[in-house]
Structures are given as C-alpha cells and as structure tokens.
C-alpha cells in the first residue's frame, strides 16, 4: 500500500513539473511587430497602351523607389479603367478618351484631371496595302476604302480609348462595319495588333504600342496624317475622395504630381529612344501648340 501511494505521488509530481515547463500559446489581442518602413499601396487603373509599351515599368519604378510605394497597375483599357475609378476601386486613373473623361469628371467621380502626354493613332496594315489607303487625305477615306475592299479589319471592341476613336471614324465615314471582314476581338492593343498581323489585316493602333511591336510583326504604318481624328492625348485623374472616402487621395496626388513634373516628363520624353529610335510618347511639356481638351 505504501509503495502504491509513493508511485501515485511520484507521478503527480512529474505531471506538475511537465505542466510548468509547457507554455500556453498566447491568446487575445496579440500583435506582430511591423516595420515602420512598410510601403504604401497605390491602385492605378490605366489603358493597355501604357502597359504594353513598357512605359509604366520605368515610370512607376522610380516613383516606387523614391517614395516607398507599391503601385498595383490595373491594365484594362480606358473604358474599363474609368468604370473601375467610378466604383472607387482605384486611387488614380491614366486614360486617353477625352469625352469619356470629361463625363466622368462632370459626374463627380474624378478630380484634378491633368494633361500628361500624347501621341497619335495610326492605321496599320499589310505592306502591300490591298485596300490602297496610303495616299488618302483623311482617316474616314482610309476606313471607307477598307470597307469597300472588305479587307480584314481587326477592332479592339473593348470600349478602350482606341476603340472609341475607331468607332467615331466609322461613324464619320457613315459606315456601320459588319461582315466576315470585320472582327471585334475584345482585347488590348498588343493582342489586337498580333491578331491583325496573323490575319494580314488592318487595325487602328496608338503609335507607341505599334513602335514597341514593329520588329515582331509584318504590319506597317500606312496612314497617320489626320490630326482631327488621330490625335491621342493622355490624361491622369485622381478618384474623388469626397465620393469615395477610402481612396488614397494624397498618395494619388503625389503620383499625379510626379508624372507631370519635370522628372516624370523627362522619363516620358526619352522612353523608347534607345530601343526604338524615337520616343513612344510626347510629354505635355513639349506639346507647344498641340493642346488637349
């Protein structure tokens, strides 16, 4: 009996000692130490041409490094970018469809709209130019010849700035494009150009994206001399914090100030010269008399 009692006592002591060595996992309001250098996030909704050309890779990187910011770029075409901003799902937008921009500013979704840069739209197509648009006098004549010949035409069909411009040219030419020769792909500029190249067809492109791809495709610029329809200005706008209190307005304005500053404008001025032989965009600083609404 004494031996049994001694064994029970020994086991109890061992259990107590073991329990004392085991620490219970912390519960309740515990926090993990965080670095004071944690970067801020900025959501940028933008048209695909600024992404496809690689401009934003250079422009954003410098801003991120100098301001400890991580920019999340949403590349989805102007129409969708404006819609994203109108939902408060972005902090700043960079787009190129003047009338759509002004409408969104008027409805209170955006403020501080600023002219940033420009280039031109171009009509590209097969080098042998089966529709014969090389020597036409304006963009509507070019589209008319393509429609009469029923040469393959690839449309972005994505409500982007390029798509909006294309449709306005068809409308001005009094043509409703339809038939097997007209293909709406619903994709970005790069994919649209690639499809046009595969189908040996025509398309409307911004000059910058075409230049960034010209060594990989067989299409050539066939018409570009129509400032009325082919002028392509880019603007940047902050999402209105009064309408969307959760947006990072101060950071958006800091970014807006950067891309329109001498530093940002210099990056735009020189981007593409070393690789493509010419800049893909013209900064607003160099616009001169080339004004934008």
Image (cartoon, rainbow, N blue to C red):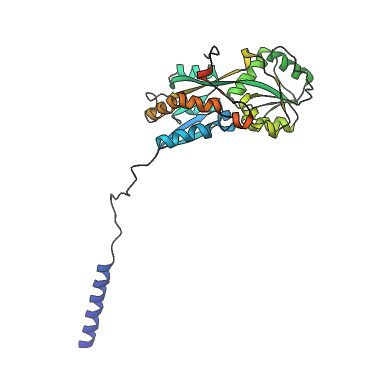
Q: Quadrant of residue 160?
A: top right
Q: Quadrant of the N terminus?
A: bottom left
Task: Classify 92 as above or below 106.
Answer: below
The residue lying at 59 percent from left, 32 percent from top is: 52
Describe residue 199's horizontal placement relative to residue 264 as left or right. right
The residue lying at 39 percent from left, 39 percent from top is: 39
| Number of numbered discs overlaid on the protein picture | 0
Question: Is residue 275 or residue 120 the one in the foreground?
Answer: 275
Q: Quadrant of residue 248?
A: top left
The residue lying at 48 percent from left, 33 percent from top is: 60
Describe residue 246's horizontal placement relative to residue 276 as left or right. left
Q: Position of residue 285 (x, y in %)?
A: 50, 19
Residue 1 makes an appearance in the image: no
In the displayed image of the protein, which residue is found farthest to the left?
Answer: 2
Residue 110 makes an appearance in the image: yes
The residue lying at 52 percent from left, 32 percent from top is: 56
Q: Position of residue 212 (x, y in %)?
A: 63, 31
Q: Position of residue 151 (x, y in %)?
A: 77, 23
Q: Position of residue 254 (x, y in %)?
A: 40, 28
Question: Is residue 249 or residue 121 the one in the foreground?
Answer: 121
């Amino acid at each position: 009996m004494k031996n049994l009692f001694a064994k029970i006592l020994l086991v109890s002591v061992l259990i107590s000692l073991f329990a004392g060595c085991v620490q219970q996992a912390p519960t309740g309001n515990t926090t993990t130490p965080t670095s004071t250098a944690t970067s801020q996030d900025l959501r940028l909704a933008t048209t695909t041409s600024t992404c496809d050309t690689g401009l934003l890779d250079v422009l954003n990187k410098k801003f991120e490094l100098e301001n400890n910011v991580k920019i999340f770029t949403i590349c989805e075409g102007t129409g969708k970018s404006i819609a994203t901003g109108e939902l408060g799902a972005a902090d700043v937008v960079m787009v190129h469809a003047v009338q759509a921009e002004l409408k969104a500013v008027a409805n209170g979704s955006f403020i501080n709209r600023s002219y940033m840069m420009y280039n031109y739209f171009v009509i590209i197509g097969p080098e042998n130019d089966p529709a014969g648009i090389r020597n036409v006098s304006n963009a509507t004549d070019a589209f008319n010849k393509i429609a009469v010949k029923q040469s393959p035409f690839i449309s972005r069909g994505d409500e982007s700035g390029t798509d909006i411009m294309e449709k306005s040219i068809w409308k001005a030419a009094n043509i409703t494009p339809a038939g097997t020769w007209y293909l709406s792909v619903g994709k970005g500029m790069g994919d649209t150009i690639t499809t046009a190249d595969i189908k040996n067809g025509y398309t409307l492109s911004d000059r910058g994206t075409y230049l960034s791809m010209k060594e990989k495709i067989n299409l050539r610029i066939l018409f570009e001399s129509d400032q009325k329809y082919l002028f392509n200005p880019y603007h940047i706008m902050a999402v209105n914090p009064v309408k969307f209190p959760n947006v990072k307005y101060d950071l958006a304005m800091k970014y807006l100030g950067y891309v329109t500053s001498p530093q940002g404008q210099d990056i735009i001025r020189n981007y593409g010269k070393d690789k493509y032989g010419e800049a893909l965009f013209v900064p607003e600083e160099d616009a001169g008399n080339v004004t934008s609404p």
